[in-house]
Amino acid sequence: MLRALFISLSESKALRSFAERSKAGQRVSQRFIAGMTLDEVVSATKTLNAAGMRVTMDRLGESVLNAEQARDAAGTYMQLLDAIEREKLDANVSVKLTGIGFDVDKALTQKLVEDMTARAASIGSFVRVDMEGSPYTQQTLDLVNAVYAKPESKGAVGIVIQSYLYRSENDVQDLCAKGIRIRLCKGAYKEPASIAFQAKSDVDANYVKLMKIMLKSGVFHGIATHHEAMIDATIRFAREEKIDPSAFEFQMLYGIRRDLQEKLVKEGWGVRVYVPFGREWYPYFMRRLAERPANVLFIAKNFFRR
């Protein structure tokens, strides 16, 4: 029930406008958002790198309204890639297609992703194309497949797969066969029972099933979870199958379970932290609460602490 509530709230334009402009809302978001500027996300990345963690940087923002806004958003990603090269950061970038014009001009969006991926490949970095709600699933897969096939991409583009969708097993099999890197997550959108598992136990079971396919594929993938049962299942499977810790990585969100992130690094597992920044943080923030309602209690306990 809480998950559905937070997903619904994430779509409220009135609450979003209030939260993103209020000092109280911005203070609450600081736990999960690295800051508002590129310099702030670079600083957060350096701190995480120093602690032995890799980083994925993401500019927050939802659907853009025109081609100019799409190019402007893509320009920020180019600046991030420039910073990765200039500062010698162990980092890559993650992008939502609707944030760079997918609802405006799909051909333009593909060209922008191609340009970003070519730039990332030139500096040894990577572009992760995020997955949005189910209306975008096949379109996102099609675009990533097309960009991956470009010689100049050199394989420097990957995708996100959500374990709550019934179709995800077939998608994972196909992507692994092509050598395309996957970030596996559970999913943070409200989807109908006709296309998605509704029970948490079913989502978790499918997550473990997909994780095993991915780890056995020989492709470097990201296992994105804070759920210790999922982490334990991954470590157990890797050890049983003698899969080297360097063959995959755990991926976690900025500000969530820092203790667990540090523990995994100390134990020799690769960890990448997803670090978002920007002023349009409200939808992202609410979806994080939907994924883990326990964060509400955490925020309430820490709101008045310095």
Image (cartoon, rainbow, N blue to C red):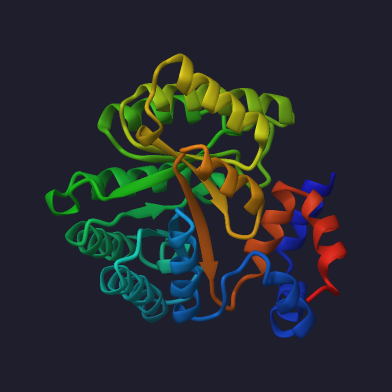
Give the image quarter of residue 159.
top left
Q: Residue at x 56, y 33 (%)?
A: 163
Report the front residue among 18 and 38: 38
Q: Is residue 277 above or below residue 272?
A: below
Q: Position of residue 302 (x, y in %)?
A: 82, 66
Q: Position of residue 281 (x, y in %)?
A: 62, 70
Q: Is residue 184 above or below residue 88?
A: above
Q: Position of residue 196 (x, y in %)?
A: 63, 32
Q: Residue at x 39, y 23 (%)?
A: 243
**Can see residue 108?**
yes
Q: Residue at x 41, y 32 (%)?
A: 245
**Can see residue 194?**
no
Q: Is residue 298 above or below residue 131?
A: below
Report the front residue among 141 and 231: 231
Q: Is residue 27 left or right of residue 226?
A: right
Q: Is residue 26 left or right of residue 207?
A: right
Q: Position of residue 286 (x, y in %)?
A: 71, 60
The N terminus sits in image quarter: top right
Residue at the front extreme, as displayed = 266
The C terminus sits in image quarter: bottom right
